[in-house]
Amino acid sequence: MSGPTSGPPVTDQPAPIDLMNTLRADRHAIRDELTSPAALRDWLVRMTGEAFAAPRPAELVAARRLRDSLRLVAAVSTGDPRGDSTWPTDEVENALSVVNETASWRARTNLVLRAGRVLGDVVFHTSPVSAALGDVAHEAVEFFAGPAAQTLRPCCAPRCVLYFVKTHPRREWCSQTCGNRVRAARHYQRIRPQV
Ligand SMILES: [Zn+2]
């Protein structure tokens, strides 16, 4: 089949879904967009609009672990038909633990007294990067625990591995590119000589 097999990034998704979608299908293989600390920083900047120092290698590992865990949670939550649809309970529980644990990394604000004035003082878990990952994980907890989880869909266009929030009733694919590919494939099926 000709034509592009991966479109532009789907950019209208909540941060946890966007993180899941850093694993994308290329024309021939799965492409991982989080392969370096710099790539993680770029993603965080795009999501938050804030500046970050270069993440440490361990923070990249944590981000990828959160991403992979969220993908498994999404697969179970949506009954994703793209894989073999069997998710061992221990693997799912491990993924949930990763999400829950990462959510506890959020920064918190303590009240402090400075020069006679009461002020808020932001306390990071370990670093701004891990706190930002904590925000993403916390958003994921709220998402999957609430009604929004019912709107999550796997994109079932050929070879697509992305998830998307079904923002309107007629949205079937993650992107226009995937929709066009599906329509092209259906057209090809129709015009192909019957054997
Ligand atoms: Zn798609």
Image (cartoon, grey):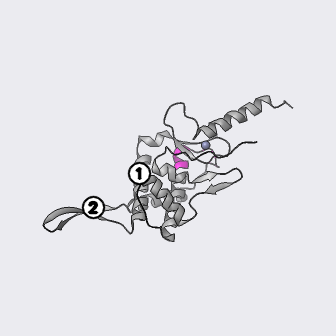
> Image quadrant of residue 148?
top left
Total tally of numbered discs in the picture: 2
Going by the numbered disc 2, the residue's amino acid type is Thr
Q: Is residue 96 visible?
A: no
Q: CA distance from mark 1 to mark 2?
A: 18 Å
Tell me the tag on residue 139: 1
Mark 2, Cα crowd under 10 Å, few <14 / some 14-19 / many 20+, is few
Residue tagged 2: 109
Question: Which residue of the protein is positioned furthest toward the right in this rendering?
Answer: 195
Quadrant location, the N terminus: top right
Q: Which element is circle 1 on?
A: helix
Residue 128 spot, x, y in % from top left: 39, 64
Q: Quadrant of ligand 1?
A: top right
Image: magenta residue range: 74-85
Going by the numbered disc 1, the residue's amino acid type is Glu
Q: Is residue 151 magenta?
A: no
Which residue occupies 69% across, 54% down? Answer: 29
Q: Is residue 162 visible?
A: yes
Mark 1, Cα crowd under 10 Å, few <14 / some 14-19 / many 20+, is some
Q: Is mark 1 within 8 Å of ligand 1?
A: no
Which residue is more in the foreground, 26 or 77? 26
Q: Is mark 2 within 8 Å of ligand 1?
A: no
53 lies above or below 149: below
Residue 20 spot, x, y in % from top left: 53, 52
Quadrant location, the C terminus: top right
